[in-house]
Image (spheres, rainbow, N blue to C red):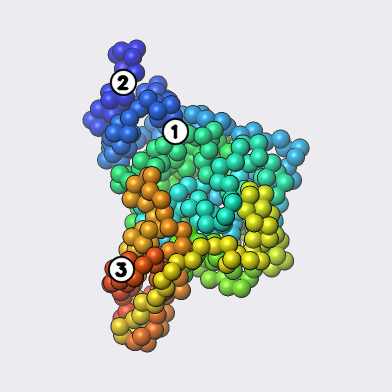
Amino acid sequence: MASDVFLPQEVIRRKRDCKELTEEEISGFVTGLADGTISEGQVSAFAMSVFFNGMLPKECAALTLAMRDSGEVLSWDRDRLQGPVVDKHSTGGVGDSVSLMLAPVLAACGAHVPMISGRGLGHTGGTLDKLTSIPGYDLRPASDQFQAVVEEVGCAIIGQTSALAPADSRLYAVRDVTATVESVALITASILSKKLAAGLDALVMDIKVGNGAFMSSMDEARELAASINRVADEAGLKTQVLITDMSQPLAPVAGNALEIAECVDYLQGNRRDARLHEIVVGLGSALLMRSGLVEDETQAKKRVEARLASGEALVRFDRMVAALGGPLGFSENSQTHLPRAPVVREVVSPMAGFVSSIDTRALGLAVVQLGGGRTRPEDDIDLSVGLDQIARLGDKVEAGDPFCRVHAPSESAMDHVCDVIGQAIIVSEEPVALSPTVIEQVR
């Protein structure tokens, strides 16, 4: 810009008018994001301008690296580690609790997982909100404690601290409530700025596509995959992308405490939903191969399955919870620690047939309406509410069979959400063809 004085409104104007931003302009705006000199209105306007007009790869890379450098970038003492530093990220969906299972599985397989996760966005649940259900769990430990847990336990799932990518933390919260979540450039920069700040050796991306995802079409999913790979490559981060189906909830449960309970059941081997398990094994195998811990996919899958069967992944989960302030032996008595909703009711099918379609986004919004998500960044959430025992596409049902159970804070909230769910799940007389869980792999 012509003047030496940085004016955020000029950056917004130029992006609004489809101009290419310079590295200096992007860096200046990110500095203002981090230090608070840019107003909430300006942050919102910038996000909306990028949403409508996009960013060139050069701009997106500059935004990513500037947000990475807005705070601390972790450096690992390799002599204290037993294996590579790896992580995964999902673009989000309904019932996507994979991070809770995958981090301890990878730790049990010999990797170190510094997972920096976010709160819920829009209709999707956030890993951070789920972990809030565990009493005492420290979501924002000091950097030295975070690194110590990753080194000793093998994994730690935390939220963004003021030290790590603080500019992204602020932009992330604004995107949630300004309908700008779906921007490919902002998704790319948000994901990779946090992952690069964590000092990773390898990353696997799970891009969801379908009516419960932010990417509603394969073209959009492939566009994001290309953006992630391009920017990661420029930053020297080994990355693989899986495009996976979100035309129904990934797990048969959606809600914060309810998904923690599902994680415990999964790691204990009490119940492993087939679609959820396929994603855990698929992402875990991809990371083991990409980081060099195994030579081929067959070996990778065997290692993941073996660590689950032996109970070592469960042990790592419990150790992580305890190391970050949660109860000792959490999985042994998880139900006594997790909050429970006061009202539980089944929503039932009005007819016999096959579950032929699920409006997954509507189910996610139902959880938000129950109080399990936010409409403003500062909103508190009800950790106990949500849905469980959700029917799966293709299920055969009789009239009166349950579609799901609703966990609500009150009868009045229950009535409204039951109506929403009754319209979101459709039954037809004939069975339907199902989409594969893992649709495509992109390197």
Which of the image's four quarters has the N terminus?
A: top left
Name the residue located 51 percent from the left edge and 47 percent from the top edge: 117
Which residue is denoted by mark 1 in the rendering? 167
Q: In which quarter of the image is residue 25?
A: top left
Q: Which amino acid, by three-letter code, is at mark 1? A: Ala
Query: In whole angstroms, how far apart are the C-alphas of marks 1 and 3?
Result: 39 Å
Q: Where is residue 321 in the image (x, y as percent from the top left)?
A: 63, 54
Dots 1 and 2: beta carbons under 8 Å? no
Q: Which amino acid, by three-letter code, is at mark 3? A: Ser
The residue closer to the viewer here, 119 or 136, is 136
Residue 112 in view: no
Identify the mark at residue 412; answer none if there is no mark.
3
Query: In whole angstroms, how far apart are the C-alphas of marks 2 and 3?
Result: 49 Å
Q: Which of label 1 and label 3 is nearer to you?
A: 3
Q: Which of label 2 and label 3 is nearer to you?
A: 3
Is 202 situated above or below 416? above
Q: In this view, does 120 lie to the left or right of 47?
A: right
Q: Residues within 10 Å of mark 3 (few under 14, many from 20)?
A: few
Q: Where is residue 400 in the image (x, y as percent from the top left)?
A: 36, 85
Name the residue located 38 percent from the left edge and 58 percent from the top edge: 371
Which residue is denoted by mark 2 in the rendering? 7
Element type where label 3 sits in the image: helix
Q: Quadrant of residue 410?
A: bottom left
The residue closer to the viewer here, 344 or 95, is 344
Name the residue located 55 percent from the left edge and 50 percent from the top edge: 88
The residue closer to the viewer here, 246 or 374, is 374
Which comes before the other along the chain, label 1 or label 3? 1
Query: In whole angstroms, how far apart are the C-alphas of marks 1 and 2?
Result: 17 Å
Element type where label 2 sits in the image: loop
Q: Position of residue 197 (x, y in %)?
A: 55, 36
